[in-house]
Image: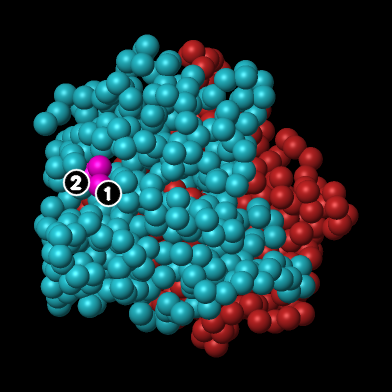
Chain colours: A red, B cyan
């Protein structure tokens, strides 16, 4: 059973995934090995994954056989386990709980060599629908405080398989970075009685120096204090704290903007490794007025060194105004 | 002039180092290129660095010539600039200030191929003395709120030159991760009227499951909620909030423990890339009772992926008890 442990100084929770335990010589330091053997996410290899939770399939095709167009399966090597109780407990001054949670994989397409940037908008919309529907389903489990959706593209961004996929992790605690945003947004709202993200969107739309693209429902910006070169955020223009409330109509607009920014990022930066993550308000807390869900897209172009790790203070060599300019001028 | 920008949601400051500006095609994504040409940190190449700030030299050797045993120079490509005023200002809802600070390099030895783990204890002590003395000097400048000492070893840990060196950055803000520790330590102290680090040291020393090594003044532990495999912290056993107050006698003990843990880490993990950083209380604030300075040593064995970046929630595949066991049994 993986375990959650709390740092007694900062309150940061860490997953100690001892079932994935690594011995000193088993770390590949420079680059994970290239995948070999059959791809578990390709048509015909459905038996290599745990049984599917959800799929978009051809009529008459049986579950866990070929004939699907998108598939959601449990992660075969989950960071957190679905079965059991949290069993929060102390050990002297330290706090721990069982590593309870869910860890699922969204196989975005049967096409091994396509990336999310290359899929049809309708296929990207199906992926976002799966994000929403799986989030709603996982939120029903009272043990889970947060549902985190993210995507790793490229080995140096942490993707262990090339086949296009995203991941969902439901966690028994609200992640630290989300808590920081919630706290900051709350403080701003208490003082201004406005949403800080809404203010940012209107200021960026007006100044137009850091806007990458927009449609009538979504806007993509290079944020003012970007941590990473070519970092972008995709936000709904209309205030909404909870990603899981997105309508099918809005998903179509969101898919269009997401595909567009990923396509531009791919072409400007020559298919860089990247991570994206959705930040949304925790389901069981009340942040309707002050929080605003969004995607954070982070290309992995620079090595994050000791200074950044140890200080939380980032050095970004590319001003976001320049990044926005490059991305703006490289549409499909 | 580099610029500091504040994220309006979380309050996180970022250095936008536009003088190091990078164009889309100039990122080397996988690995920084191997250093070519003469090493600017070797004997005889003193003219390749800015003039030295401090050096330990043979008698009669002139500054900025060969004959030194350790050398401190300004970073040729500083992330922050020493000249000028902070000029804090708003731009609409955003906050920025000039990138004022100091960025220095400590060239730890003339020997290009040695690492800190291989140096004599007396040489390691000289390096730590330089950390202390440069910190004290930089703390005199009222513009600097924090002095950060760190070391990157290996290209994937962000070291752009192989020659053994550490870095010092003086910043006009207290870094976010240090602020988090200060806040957590303060809360603990308010409630318990004890230092959380002191409590941790005595609990670890008693339980002895995560102690890597100790001497009469210092202890090295694999922390209970380690973020990274084989992460270790080196702490003074006696309460002290401010690294810069360390005595020469304590430096000798600190050097012995630091060299020892770096040596063990090198041998157990086959010379892994790593970062270390010193966390200490900011000079101009009062944290004497609740804070406790320490080194955090972080081998870079796993790829930090989207989940960690976006959530601040780490997955560590090696329980710290196992890491401590390996390191304990691999002394010199």
Q: Name the residue: 15% across, 60% down.
A: B59
Asked if the residues shown at circle 1 and circle 2 are in contact, with their CB atoms under 8 angstroms apart, the answer is: yes
Name the quarter where the C terminus of chain B is drawn.
top left
Q: Is residue A280 left or right of residue B111?
A: right
Residue A10 appearing in the image: no
Q: Quadrant of residue B228?
A: top left
Nearest the camera: A166 or B90? B90
Nearest the camera: B145 or A161? B145
x, y percentage for residue B311?
54, 46
Circle 1 SS class: helix
Nearest the camera: B286 or A203? B286
Q: Name the residue: 64% across, 61% down.
A: B7
Q: Is residue A214 left or right of residue A332?
A: right
SS assignment for the magenta stretch, majority? helix
x, y percentage for residue B168?
39, 57
Q: Is residue B290 left or right of residue B45?
A: right
Chain letter of the residue beneath label 1 in the structure image: B
Residues at marks 1 and 2, CA–CA distance in whole angstroms:
6 Å
Q: Residue A277 magenta-drawn?
A: no
The circle drawn on residue B163 is: none
Task: Using the image, determine if residue A304 lies above or below residue A46.
Answer: below
Task: Using the image, determine if residue A281 lies above or below residue A91.
Answer: below
Question: Can you identify the residue that label 2 sits on?
Answer: B123
The circle drawn on residue B127 is: 1
Q: Name the residue: 30% across, 32% down.
A: B249
x, y percentage for residue B68?
17, 61
Q: Is residue A298 left or right of residue A22?
A: right
What span is in magenta?
A: B123-127
Q: Quadrant of residue A144?
A: top right
Residue B215 appearing in the image: yes
């Amino acid at each position: 059973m993986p375990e959650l442990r709390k740092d007694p100084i900062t309150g940061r929770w860490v997953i100690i995934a001892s079932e994935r335990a690594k011995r000193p010589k088993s770390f590949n330091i420079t680059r994970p090995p290239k995948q070999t053997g059959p791809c578990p996410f390709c048509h015909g290899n459905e038996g290599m994954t745990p049984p599917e939770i959800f799929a978009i399939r051809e009529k008459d095709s049986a579950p866990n056989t070929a004939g699907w167009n998108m598939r959601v399966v449990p992660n075969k090597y989950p960071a957190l386990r679905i079965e059991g109780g949290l069993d929060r407990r102390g050990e002297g001054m330290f706090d721990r709980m069982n590593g309870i949670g869910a860890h699922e994989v969204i196989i975005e397409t049967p096409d091994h060599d396509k990336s999310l940037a290359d899929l049809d908008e309708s296929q990207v919309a199906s992926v976002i629908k799966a994000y929403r529907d799986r989030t709603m389903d996982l939120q029903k489990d009272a043990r889970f405080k947060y549902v985190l959706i993210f995507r790793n593209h490229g080995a140096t961004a942490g993707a262990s398989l090339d086949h296009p996929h995203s991941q969902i992790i439901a966690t028994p605690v609200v992640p630290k970075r989300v808590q920081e945003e919630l706290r900051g947004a709350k403080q701003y709202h208490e003082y201004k009685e406005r949403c800080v993200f809404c203010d940012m969107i209107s200021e960026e739309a007006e100044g137009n120096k850091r806007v990458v693209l927009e449609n009538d429902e979504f806007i993509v910006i290079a944020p003012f204090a970007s941590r990473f070169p070519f970092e972008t955020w995709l936000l709904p223009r209309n205030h909404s704290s909870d990603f899981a409330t997105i309508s099918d109509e809005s998903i179509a607009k969101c898919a269009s903007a997401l595909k567009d920014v990923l396509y531009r990022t791919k072409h400007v930066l020559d298919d860089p490794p990247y991570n994206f993550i959705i930040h949304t308000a925790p389901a069981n807390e009340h942040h309707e007025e002050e929080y605003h869900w969004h995607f954070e897209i982070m290309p992995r172009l620079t090595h994050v060194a000791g200074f950044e790790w140890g200080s939380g203070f980032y050095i970004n060599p590319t001003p976001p105004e320049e990044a926005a300019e490059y991305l703006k001028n490289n549409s499909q």
